[in-house]
Each structure stands twice: as structure tokens, then as C-alpha cells.
Amino acid sequence: MESGPTLFGETALTRRKQRTEAVAKHVFFAMALAMIIPLALIIGYLVVKAWPALSIDFLLDPPLRGMKAGGIWPALLGTIYLVIVSLAVAAPIGVLAAVYLNEYAKDNWFNRVINLAVINLAGVPSIVHALFGLGAFVLAAKFGKSIIAASLTLAVMTLPVIIASTREALAAVPRPFREACWNVGATRWQTIQSVVLPNSISGILTGIILQVSRAAGETAPIMFTGALFFKAVERGDLFAYSLTDQCMALSMHLYVISTQVPGVPEALPYATAVVLLGAVLLVNITAISLRIHMRARKKW
Amino acid sequence: MLARTGRRKPSTRSVWVVWIETAFEWVIRLCGISAILFVLGIFYFVFSKAAPIFFESEFSIAEFLFSTQWYPTSEVNVRYGVLALIVGTLSVTLLSMLIAVPFGLGAAIFVSEFCGPKLKESLKIVIELLAAIPSVVWGFIGLTVMKTIIEKTTGAEMGLNVLNGGIILALMSVPIIVSIGEDALKAVPDSYREAGIALGATRWQLVYRVLLPAAKTGLLAAVLLGVGRAIGETMAVLMATGHAVNIPGSLVDPVRTLTATIAAELGEAPEGANHYRVLFMVGVLLFTITFIINITADLVIRGIRRK
């Protein structure tokens, strides 16, 4: 303590500490940025490359001249069909599964097994889901390669997304809400229906929206269960596919025109990638804004 | 309990309503166990398509796992050895983890310990958006942008290789590592931090001496889930790794992974042929690998929670 008057002043030790502190902070900041900035640049580059081809006509026209010109309408429409059908299957099952796990299940070994199953379902590689879809829906259930088989495959694959976010939303409803309802004589289901679900609806919606984005982007699970290379569809025709038809899909179309078809003008795959990326990010941003909005309005 | 006491009084609800409600609760239970049914279903359907191959003279499990010769469509010399594909998967996964783990954990530490609430919120949103980018778009980025960059910087004649796939997979698995890693750091009780600060530790000393040791199992789980994602990824590696069945000698050698092989060949394999069954066998192998990884990660996470 030779520096008595400057007891709380700078010593060599504190200076060194501050220096390492600053270095550490900046290094970690750089690491966080290192994954964001290159990506921003890449996306910017994709948009620039895609720009000449992007237009309303690109969205509404079918591919022409062996996919070397024209637009992406059949693929866009196919993706919409796949998403809607898979959502119609996955949303009720996923939400009810989450209701079971959060409201009915007791903490025993059986429910631990269910949890493990959910985690594993989320971790199974997408191509294994494709094999499953092929074996179960295309062949065993005899749907053939069709929108229905592909959508069911997507539904199984995206189920964990809905289960996880619905559970989170249900768990966020305080327990006293339920107790108050039970105390006036309501049954478990009446409580869920009139108190738990209305108070968690926006969280559940967020999960459903995330399912949409996931289902729209997947390629591998639909490759062998219902997506096909090309199908002639009139410009802007909304009802071009029936559930037992095979369809084109945006993700599959991007794969096909960037790897399987030689001589496609450069802007076309870029534009397809940008449309797919834009749609998925837009859906996710919707989910995020909904979540932020909901958090700001939360009354408890 | 409460419901039961309510039932003793004469109910004002009609029998039908009560009956429908009971039925509906059974539907809920059924949905609850659906995840188990689906996981069992995945195993059953994939394995049952693969199983007949065990009775074929062309196939032996030892050759399948330990031979590097993959000639599934050869007329005279059919060989179903997936070792080169396993090595391909492992090399791309390993490289991606070498990149993604330090960056992912670094970013997780920054998000959890070093930044203010506003920046934290925006970084978490960006990470969530990163995780949402479809794998086929990643593959397209590998096929176009990354390929050009690699050809220009390394002088390799073919930009689709281990390096390309590794970088793409790293970018894809960073978000999951960041978000699980951040959860792990958040799970360390604040009293640990307060004790450290009271002793005069800086943030860095706190991270290095207190938080990393305390959160190490959770961070391990984050890395495991990243590995699981990287091994299971299909479209991105299909498009970015150059598609040659090959044990890579350097970073710029093309490889092919297990997942990409299924995606590339299933369409051409006639249904019920040996080739077709072997591809389902590869599916069984992938399912087993990711199953083990996911169970381990879950046990690790559960271990922390119990503590």
C-alpha cells in the first residue's frame, strides 16, 4: 500500500484487468458480428444478382422453354399447397400434444419418454423423414407420390416446432389463473378452453407461423414424396393441383434449376433463392413481431 | 381433486357434454403420445424397407461399415461400402464444428454477459432469422458465392469441397449453438456472478473462471446439438461438397456425405432393389447416429437441471 492517497486509483493490476476486459469484450463482439456481417453481405449479393429477374411477372408466370425462362408460379403455388395441408395436420396435433404435456401429464417416466421422443423427432435428419414419408405415406398408405403424402411428411417433421412453442406459451399462463377457474367448479378441459388457451393464443400462433416457415423451406422430405421437376400450369391459376397430384415446390425448384438443368440464365436461380428466402424471413419476422407485441401487452 | 368434488353434486351439464368432453380428453392424450408413435414409426418404416438386404448374398454388414467401395449400380462388381461416406460426413462435420464452436460460444458469451438489453434483443432476433434460412438456400450460397470465393482464395480448381461444405454447415449450426449456449449461461445462478463481482473480478475473469466451468455441461449440450444438426443436414451438403465418393486428403478435396448419397441416388434406385434397400440402411445408420447424439444431449441438459 505504498500509494496510500491513491488507494482507489489506477494500479498496474487494475489497468491490466481493464485492458483484458476491453479485449475480451471486443473479441466476443467480433465473434458475434463474424456470423452476421458475411451473411448480410451474401444476402445483399443474392438480391443484387436476382434484381434483373425479379418482377410480378416472375412470380405469376410458369417456367418457359425448359425452365430457362419465365417465372416460378407452379412452384410458388405448390409450396403454398404443401404448407397449408401440412399446417392443417400438424397444427391441431401439435397444439393438443402440447396441451397434454403441459396440462395433463404428470412428471413420470412415461412423460419423460414423450419428451425424449419430441426432442428426437426434431433431431431426425430431414432425409430420414423423407425415407419415412416414402415408406409410410407413399407406399404403405398408398397415397402415391402426391401433395398429401409430402404434406404429411412435412407435418411429422415440423410437429416439434409447434409442440415446443405451444408448450412455452401454455407454461407462461400463471398457475393461479387455473386454480381460480377450478375453484368455481370448472373441469380441467373447461379451464383449458376458457382460461388457458385464450391467454396463450398469441404464443400458439407464433409457433404455428414458425411451422409455416419451416415447412416452406424444406426440400429433402418432399423430394421423394410428392415434389416433381416440372408441371405445366397456366399463369396465375390458383387451382392447378389436386391433393393426389404431385406438385412443384419453390425449394425443390431452386435445387433443380441450380444443379440439374444446364444453361439456365444466371438471374433465374438467384431470383428463386431470393423469393424463397424473402418469404421465409417475412414469415419469421411476422412471428417475432407478434411475440414482441404480445409481450408488451401482457397483463401479468 | 377439485373436479371430483364437483362431480358428486347433481351436475347441471347434460350427459352428452360430459361424454364429449371425456372423449376429447382422450384425443388430447392420443396427440400427446403421437411423438412417440412417430419416432417408432420412422424407425419401423425405414428399417423394414432396409431389412431384406440382410438376406442378400451381395451384402455384408462388415463390408457396409468398413469398406470404402461404393459402387451401388455396377453390373459386375457391386459394392455397398459406406466408410468413405461416413468419413465424408465426419470431415465436413468436424470442420464445421472447428469453426462454429468457438464463434458460436463466443457469440453466446457476448449475448449473455457483455451486451446491454437492447443489443441483446436485436442480436437474438438476428440469430433466430439466421436459423430460419432454408437449407436449400444455404446450398445455393455454397454453390455460387462460396464456390467462387474458395476458387479465388485457395486456387483450388473445384470450389465445391470439404472447405465449402464445412463453412456452410458452420454458418448453419452457429444459431443453434448460440441459443442453447446462451440458455446454459443464463441457467448459472446470478449469485455466482455477484460473488465474483464482489471479489473484484472483471467480466472476463467472471466468464473464464466462474461461468464457463459452471455452464460447461450445458455448453457441451449446445455443441452436441450443433453436431447433430451438421450430420443430419442434407440439401446444403448435397449442393456444396462436390459429390465425389472419396476419402478427403485435404480441405479442398470434394467428398460426399451419407445424407447427400440418399438424396442423390434414391430417385434412381428401382423400388425393392438392393441399391434401394442399402439407401434405407444408410437412413437407419443416420437415424441411429442422431438418436444417440440427441439422447446424450438431453441427458446432459437434464443433468444440469437436476443439479
Image (spheres, coloured by chain):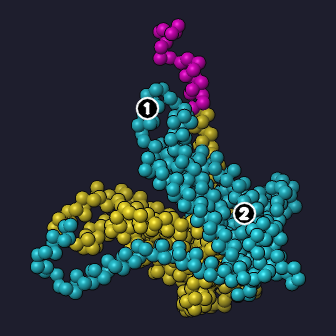
Q: Is A242 placed left or right of B165 in the picture?
A: left
- Image point (62%, 67%), residue name: B288
Q: Nearer the viewer, residue B110 or A142?
A: A142
Magenta stretch contains residue A17: yes
Q: Which quarter of the image is occupied by the N terminus of chain B?
A: bottom left
Count of all numbered marks drawn on residues in the image? 2
**Residue B299 appears in view:** yes
Location of residue B36 with respect to B273 vertically, above or below = above
- Image point (57%, 79%), residue name: B44
The amino acid marked with disc number 1 is Ala
Measured as percent of width and height from the top left, residue B185 is found at 50, 45
Indicate the colour of chain B.
Answer: cyan
The image quadrant that residue A191 belongs to is bottom left
Instruction: Read off the magenta span.
Output: A1-21
Q: Looking at the colours in the rendered structure, which chain would you say is drawn in yellow?
A: A
Measured as percent of width and height from the top left, residue B170 is found at 67, 56
The image quadrant that residue A272 belongs to is bottom right
Q: Nearer the viewer, residue B252 or A79?
A: B252
Residue bearing the label numbered 2: B89
